[in-house]
Image (tube, helix red, strand yellow):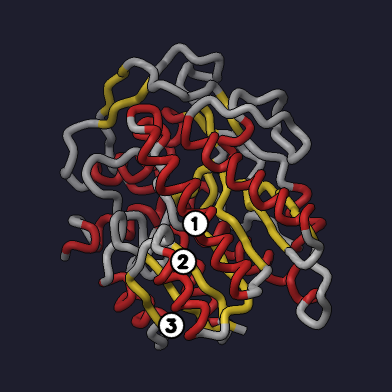
Amino acid sequence: MTVLITGGTGYIASHTAVILLQQNIDIVLLDNLLNSKAIVLDKIELITGKRPTFVEADIRDEDSLDKVFAQYNINSVIHFAGLKAVGESVENPLSYYDNNVVGSLRLLSAMDKANVNNLIFSSSATVYGDPERLPLDESCALRTTNPYGANKLQVEQMMSDLCNSNDKWSMVALRYFNPVGAHESGLIGEDPNGIPNNLLPYVTQVASGLREKLSVFGDDYDTVDGSGVRDYIHVVDLAEGHVKALGLFDSVNSSNEGIGFEAINLGTGNGYSVLEMVKSFEEINGIEIPYQICPRRAGDIDSCYADASKAFTTIGWKAERGLDEMMRDAWNWQSKNPQGYEE
């Protein structure tokens, strides 16, 4: 079995690659290196003793995709490639539709031509928008509040439509919540370009002196302390969820009938506010994090956390790592790599 990983040198994808290689599963990483760096390949090799096959290409490039499927014996695809900042998607929606929706369309078309019918898609809890109820389960209403979430939902719809059109397809949308942390080695982690859009990388950059203070966007939400509440999940737990989901395809490898479309939440089921996360980081790592309260960001919501029971019953997955490990591993990565992969 060979798994193609799009966006393969990115944050979650690199951690998934490590686990797959450690399980002796062949992989091909495809990335245009817009939001990641090729040195990630060296780090993966240091952790696993194996260097993954890498193709530098954009998923919107049909010729490159066709060549990859023709050259390698791809059985399944894990699709991470895409832009991922909610605020940026509000400011520049056309770029997000081009990268995330058009790119996914071309990937699905290339898979169809190559008769590769197994896909795991990196979806998001943003498809639920302003939550109908909490905790969020897979039957909750889908009503996005920003272009990023709309992109994810549109790709899910394409996947569902393909499965309805032909029973050869097996497609899983993993709707995950807020990934944080890093590999325990400190060799790979989250390395955002420019100013971080996510909470914990900003916190760790403040801790390392790269940033003066943390901006907390909103203190008037209907939450325990007025700051937004999210379900934070360790990136290694998240990566393990993708590997577990591959097991769903085992039953169809010897037949022509796929499993159809499945949407599965990956989260811990626990919600923590921004200020609670800051306090936890300070306590675990012994570092004070100065912060300032700023206006809310467009597209943000009060609270969002998961009911992840379907993940356990469907793929045998549940989050194993707690807040302490998230904070410890995030700081371990940042302290060893204060300038990210640039060093």
Q: Which residue is mark 2?
A: 15
Quarter holding the C terminus? bottom left
Q: Name the mark on residue 9.
A: none
Q: Is residue 293 above or below residue 81?
A: above
Give the mark count: 3
Kind of residue at disc 1: Val
Would residue 29 appear left or right of 174 to someone viewing this image?
A: left
Label 3, label 1: how far apart the Cα atoms are: 17 Å
**Mark 2 burial class by Cα count in 10 Å: few <14, some 14-19, many 20+:** many
Where is residue 237 shown, x and y percent of the image? 57, 59
Residue located 50% across and 79% down the image: 27
Where is residue 278 shown, x and y percent of the image? 38, 35
Q: Secondary structure at mark 1?
A: helix
Task: Answer whether residue 199 is visible to the viewer in this image.
Answer: no
Residue located 27% across and 64% down the image: 37
Q: Secondary structure at mark 2?
A: helix
Would residue 113 appear left or right of 328 to someone viewing this image?
A: right
**Mark 1 burial class by Cα count in 10 Å: few <14, some 14-19, many 20+:** many
Q: State the residue in front, 154 or 213.
A: 154
Where is residue 81 shown, x and y percent of the image? 44, 57
Q: Are marks 2 and 1 in contact (CB under 8 Å)?
A: yes
Kind of residue at disc 2: His
Residue located 65% across and 25% down the image: 131
Q: Is residue 308 above or below residue 166?
A: above
Where is residue 230 shown, x and y percent of the image? 53, 34
Residue located 81% across and 75% down the image: 256
Q: Secondary structure at mark 3?
A: helix
Q: Name the mark on residue 48.
A: 3
Q: Which residue is mark 1?
A: 235
Label 2, label 1: how far apart the Cα atoms are: 7 Å
Instruction: Say whether disc 3 or disc 1 marks the residue closer to the N-terminus.
Output: 3
